[in-house]
Image: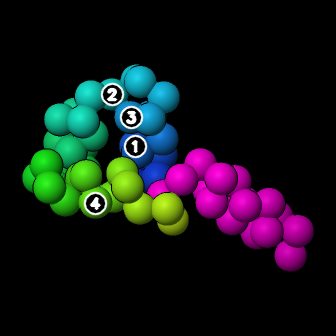
């Protein structure tokens, strides 16, 4: 599963941080790094999609 989608689900309240970490198969300190990573934001995800479709 795409990490960005799991993190987006967490940010929207569909998953707990523990569920998010379990789905991704990582521990709590690692998930906090991913959640705080600006490249994992929804804006980055939508920009990547729009860039990919315009090529």
In this rendering, the label closer to the viewer, 3 or 4 = 4
- Residue most extreme to the bottom: 55
Inter-mark Cα distance, 4 to 2: 17 Å
- Which image quarter is the C terminus in? bottom right
Query: How many neighbours does mark 2 have within 10 angstroms: few (below 14), some (14-19), or many (20 or more)?
Result: some
**Contact, CB < 8 Å: mark 1 with mark 2?**
yes
Question: Image height check: is 32 above or below 12?
Answer: below
Identify the residue position indicated by label 4 in the image. Answer: 33
* The one of 16 and 33 positioned closer to us in this rendering: 33
Q: Which secondary structure lies at badge 3?
A: helix
- Residue 6 - label: 1
Tell me which label, 1 or 2, sits earlier in the chain. 1
Expressed as whole percent of the image width and height from the top left, the position of residue 6 reads 40, 43
Inter-mark Cα distance, 4 to 1: 14 Å
- Residue 10 - label: 3
Query: How many neighbours does mark 3 have within 10 angstroms: few (below 14), some (14-19), or many (20 or more)?
Result: some
Quarter of image, res 9: top left
Question: Image height check: is 23 above or below 37?
Answer: above
Tell me which label, 4 or 2, sits earlier in the chain. 2
**Contact, CB < 8 Å: mark 2 with mark 3?**
yes
- Residue most extreme to the right: 54
Determine the residue positioned at 76% across, 69% down.
Answer: 52
Q: Which secondary structure lies at badge 4?
A: helix
Identify the residue position indicated by label 2 in the image. Answer: 15
In the image, 26: left or right of 10?
left
Inter-mark Cα distance, 1 to 2: 8 Å
**Contact, CB < 8 Å: mark 1 with mark 3?**
yes
Q: Which residues are magenta?
A: 40-55
* The one of 9 and 23 positioned closer to us in this rendering: 9
Tell me which label, 2 or 3, sits earlier in the chain. 3
In the image, 41: left or right of 22?
right
């Amino acid at each position: 599963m795409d990490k960005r989608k799991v993190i987006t689900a967490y940010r929207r309240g569909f998953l707990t941080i523990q569920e998010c970490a379990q789905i991704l198969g990582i521990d709590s300190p690692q998930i906090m790094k991913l959640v705080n990573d600006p490249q994992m934001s929804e804006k980055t995800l939508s920009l990547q999609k729009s860039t990919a479709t315009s090529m």
